[in-house]
Amino acid sequence: MLLTISTTHQPATDLGYLFHKSPFRCQSTNLPFGIANIFYPEATEAKCTLALVLDIDTIDLVRGKNRKNSSMPLEQYVNDRPYVCSSFLSVALSQVFGQTLNGKCKQRPDLVETAIPLTARMSVLPCRGGEHFLRNLFEPLGYKVNAERYQLDVNFPDWGESSYFTVELSKTTTVKELLNHLYVLVPVLDNQKHYYIDENEIEKLIKRGEGWLAKHPERENIAKRYLKYKSSYSREALERLMEINPVEVDSYTEDNEQSEDEVENTLNLNEERLGSVLSALKVSGAETVVDLGCGEGKLLRMLLKDKQFKKILGVDVSIRSLEIASERLRLNDLPPVQKNRINLIHGSLMYRDERFNNFDAAAVIEVIEHLDKPRLKAFERVLFEFSRPNTIVLTTPNKEYNKVWENIGSDKLRHKDHRFEWSREEFKTWASKIGEKFGYTIRFLNIGLRVDNLGGPTQMGIFTRNN
Ligand code: SAH
């Protein structure tokens, strides 16, 4: 893992004072997970660059007390951790440059508060959430961001892009501020942590986020990712940061929470899709709704906000998704009246289940493409023959639209778990057959920005029971 920090502030070798490391020799420090090497590839009056190379010992990680369990036995040995900027970098920053992070420099205290032109370059930075999220994190802080994305494998361009970037961040600022931003935001971009998250992490976030995090437009995403989606922690951290920066309290509203989804640049599509589903459900007059394959509960949250819906059930086969949904909906903190309206259950759309019965409507949003095609028949019977709600709102990707997006060729799927994707014609044929067989009338809609001859990115069918 390589991080360099350069300045053209003159004399540039002053950087040595700020980092407490002489520009004229190499130094190494042992860390619990490997060795941190610090040296200056260039050190002149005009320009000085400090390099931090982390040599992470993955074998030691496996054998040591930091052992990580994994369902893939080789993953412990063969992974990206030695090469990318991650939470290991943050730990190294605090152990190797602790005084710099805290803004201490006995020899030249004047330098600590001086904003100087700085460029940080990270050779490989995993950006989960893509370039869009990377920019959303650093641009509001005043950085000029240069990002170069890597393909998954240059020998197989069809596999598309990876989430790895070489990133250069430039700003005239203090070294202290730059390091604090990197300390917090690098693991946020990577969205993993190599150690267990406990309450001490709240303190670290508050300390390192002081002065900037409370007013950052992505503060909620930052806190959530930093604290590994432990919502009680991120809430506490944000509340305390707000107390430290009371000016910002006014601009903070609960309704701002949509920023959580801005991670995906599909935000608009996602929102539009859920908005269309919600309005179809409202128009149907449904008061009780089952969301089959509810995932992390985005639709459930909208349903809960609307008083028309008196009974809401979320079903998913993934326990992890249900846990996230429960946290996001803060189910444990809801007042009893609200809590009685909603329930989350673990279940599969493949098996007949009485718990899906007696709902006015069902939503099946971006789920069928995750089912093996030969098993679609089982799902059709479960929903259209046995549960038989009056209204079924179902969405699935429109394959034709894939050519519009850079990252996927026209024959490729949008997500690695998709078993198939349908053209509009294929969806219509499937839906019409079901309509005929089980007695439903169907209305088809395009969702998202339409392109001539290709339709919209998402296709929706609203099935209404004939009797
Ligand atoms: N409807 C959600 C999630 C879509 S992702 C949304 O629009 O945001 C697809 C979801 O379907 C995942 O959460 C996955 O766990 C769930 N799923 C896949 N196969 C399933 C099955 N057989 N039974 C129930 N849920 C399933």
Image (cartoon, grey):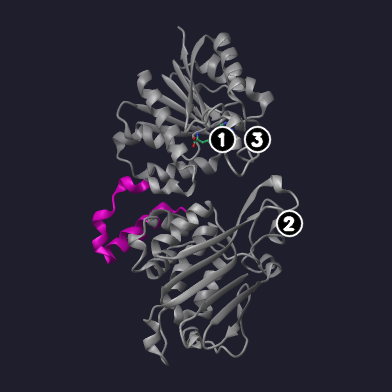
Q: Is mark 1 within 8 Å of ligand 1?
A: yes
Q: Is residue 409 left or right of residue 466?
A: right
The answer to whether marks 2 and 1 mark residues whose Cβ atoms lie closer than 8 Å is no
Q: Is residue 121 magenta?
A: no
Instruction: Measuring from the top left, give residue 283's x and y in whole percent.
Output: 36, 20
* Quadrant the C terminus occupies: top left
Q: Is residue 169 left or right of residue 202?
A: right
Instruction: Measuring from the top left, give residue 432's x and y in whole percent.
Output: 57, 14
**Camera-nearest residue between 343 and 126:** 126
Q: Quadrant of residue 223?
A: bottom left
Outermost residue on the right side: it is: 155
Ligand 1 is found in the corner quadrant, namely top right
Outermost residue on the top side: it is: 467
**Camera-nearest residue between 263 and 97:** 263
The residue under label 1 is 317
Specify the segment rendered in magenta.
228-257
Which tag, 3 or 1, sits closer to the chain's start?
A: 1
Can you see residue 348? no
Amino acid at pointer 1: Val
The residue under label 2 is 74
Query: Disc 3 or disc 2, which is closer to the eye?
Result: 3
Q: Main secondary structure of the magenta part?
A: helix
Q: Label 1's element?
A: loop
The residue at 38%/81% (across/down) is 114
Amino acid at pointer 3: Ser
The answer to whether marks 3 and 1 mark residues whose Cβ atoms lie closer than 8 Å is no
The residue under label 3 is 410
* Quadrant the N terminus occupies: bottom right
**Residue 168, above or below 27:** above
